[in-house]
Amino acid sequence: MTEFNNVTVQKEANIYFDGKVISTSIAFLDGSKKTLGVMLKGEYEFNTEQKEIMEIMSGKLEVLLPNKSEWINIKSGDSFEVPKSSSFKLNIHEITNYCCDYVDE
């Protein structure tokens, strides 16, 4: 899917890591939420409240998922899931465009 219809868009961006990660929240009529964002090269650690599904539209990175010891290579078109109430690390190798889906379990 290349676009979303009938959504509400948050006007103010979510800015993390001194502007190296920026996203915008969107809400759907059914109450679901996603963020669309860009991450610059660097290493980052995020915490989750809900289960997250990260879809990578463009870019190249590695992810270290909770309770894992090996980094996973991720590229354009790939996605990965992160459980709720956990943390994960990212090593961004090139500018990455992503869509994060927040899932109620």
Image (cartoon, rainbow, N blue to C red):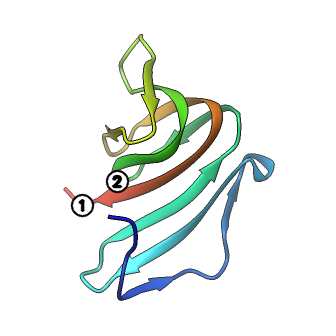
Q: Say few, some or many: other residues with alpha carbon within 10 Å of mark 2 (under 14 / 14 to 19 / 20 or more).
A: some
**How far, Cα to Cα, is label 2 from label 1?**
6 Å
| Residue 12 picture location, percent across and down | 67, 77
Q: Is residue 9 above or below residue 64?
A: below
Q: Which residue is mark 1?
A: 104
Is disc 2 in contact with disc 1, using a CB cutoff of under 8 Å? yes
| Residue 68 picture location, percent across and down | 37, 17
Which mark, by number, is residue 50?
2
**Residue at the spot x=31%, y=40% of the render?**
81
Dot 2 lies on which element?
A: loop
Residue placed most toward the observer, 3 or 104? 3
Question: Given the image, on which type of amino acid does mark 1 rest?
Answer: Asp
For residue 84, side relative to residue 72 (left or right): left
Q: Is residue 86 above or below residue 12?
A: above
Dot 1 lies on which element?
A: loop
Q: Is residue 103 above or below residue 90?
A: below
**Residue at the spot x=45%, y=17% of the render?**
71
Quarter occupied by the N terminus: bottom left
For residue 95, side relative to residue 30 (left or right): right
| Residue 56 picture location, percent across and down | 44, 45
